[in-house]
Amino acid sequence: MNNQNQEQRLRNILFNSLDAFVGVDHNGLITEWNQQAANIFGWSQDEAVGQNMDEIIIPERFREAHQQGMQRFLQSGHTEVLNRRIQLEAKRKNGEEFPIEMAITYILNSDSHEFYAFIQDISSRKVEEKKLRFLASNDPLTGVRNRSYFNANLPEAMARSRRSDKSLALMYLDVDHFKSINDSLGHEAGDLLLKEFASRLKGKLREADIVSRLGGDEFAVIIEGIVADDDASKVATNIIQELNQGNWLGGANLKITSSIGIAIYDGRAIESDKLVALADKAMYMAKHSGRNNFKILRFEDIEASIEEKSHPRAPASILNTKSLLSVQQKSGGNFLQNTLSALRRHLDMDVAFISHFHDGVREFRFVDSKDMSPPIAVGDSGSLEDSYCQRVIDGRLPEIINDAFELPEAMNMPVTALVPVRAHMSVPIKLSDGKIYGTFCCFSYTPDQTLNERDISVMHVFADLISQHL
């Protein structure tokens, strides 16, 4: 094969290459332009050859830098762009800018430099890379940040808090009764609800605040630059007010609320998971106090609680509590019944009972009622899954319910249709080995807005007393 045939063969290969092949002389004029270059840039070979490459494919804002780089190479023989792949923006004939990947080489021909470039349109690749980057740090359903991004950024935010000497607030929140809503309306509606929840949440926060979906209906918010607890309180209040506006899912008759736990970070040297645990604890405190509210915790609160628990309740204190509710030590075999009756009267509730859990069943062991015909009796039993008490222990219902008619989770239960329970309190009875024996519960047929955390504390005291007599 003679030289002429070899040259023609090479030109045919380059002309039909899957990469755009562009040749430029030392004056910047195009000398080679294959079919793929025509396809990518929109200029035919006849239109491109002889034209200044700057004007044809380089966006105007980059031309000066390109020309300076060309001059440096011609004067010094040095440049950083030769013989390696680089990515930059190019321009099509219609003015559209797009990303390319390009490898440039050169030859010296009769004391003149000739430059040759192999170019690929990487628009599709960039779109895919952008999608992957988004999925790596964002939740695909709601569009807010995901758990991975949250886990990586919380320690960094805590470090910034230490340097700035300003507190950080970590909010941990979920959708109250989401499981019931999801089960009743379907998963598609549940997904739409989560998207709207995330949108409303973001709408009440600053651009700098980091909102993440941790999974399911659980979300977290990192708020930096907190000066006082009141700053976090205002944000939480605004969020709750927004959620209470209603008009969810385009006007569906839904009451969507959230329980918000807020942990205040004060700059101490701790791992980020400790802060998350504190915010999670605060959220469950919000749930147990009736939902649709928020609770704030600092590490000092937990330390004080641990200190208090490290000193067991003195026997005299227990005796004082018994005396307060007229429960005598010498009650013989009727101690539990008398305790139950005294507590019900103290709280002014209609019915109180002690139940025992076993084999998936809740059995009523002691019952006390204001009237002579309570809806439950000693020896009755029922499914644990459908019971108020089991749902309280699971965290699906708060320990205090001032009005069950306002809670979809409570109203969807079969027992509610049979017993018109309104106000309700329930606490677990834990044995010395940590196992749950059952529950200590009381309820009323009318909503009682006076129930509070002090009442629940009294319930817990008596649950401990009961466990000692089982």
Image (tube, rainbow, N blue to C red):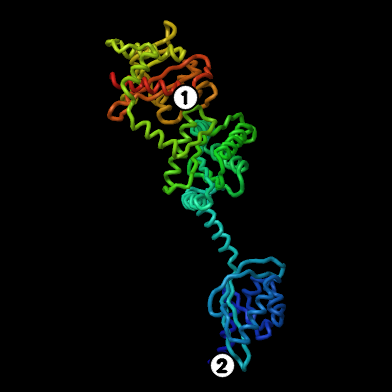
- Asked if residue 361 shows in the view, the reply is no
Q: Position of residue 54 (x, y in %)?
A: 69, 77
User: What residue do we see at 45% from left, 19% from top?
Assistant: 415
Nearest the camera: 188 or 65? 65
Image quadrant holding the C terminus, namely top left
Mark 1–mark 2 Cα distance, whole angstroms, equals 96 Å
Crowd rating for badge 1 (residues with CA inside 10 Å; few <14, some 14–19, many 20+): few
Q: Position of residue 303 (x, y in %)?
A: 40, 37
x, y percent for residue 398 = 46, 27
Tell me the residue that label 2 is attached to.
3
The amino acid type found where label 2 is placed reads Asn
Q: Residue at x 41, y 30 (%)?
A: 394
Q: Nearer the viewer, mark 1 or mark 2?
A: 1
The answer to whether 43 appears left or right of 202 in the picture is right
Q: Residue furthest top?
A: 372
Decide which of tag 1 and tag 2 comes sooner along the chain: 2
Rendered position, 125 above or below 171: below
Q: Give residue 239's quadrant in the image.
A: top right
Of the pair 224 and 422, the residue shown nearer to us: 224
Q: Secondary structure at mark 1?
A: helix
Do the CB atoms of the residues marked 1 and 2 lie less than 8 Å apart?
no
**What amino acid does circle 1 point to?**
Glu
Q: Which circle marks residue 453 in the picture?
A: 1
Closer to us: 149 or 307: 307
Say which element carries label 2: helix
Residue 363: x and y, percent? 34, 19
* Disc 2 crowd, CA 10 A, few/some/many (<14, 14-19, 20+): few
Q: Is residue 44 left or right of residue 334?
A: right
Figure label count? 2
Taking 199 as reference, is 438 above or below it? above
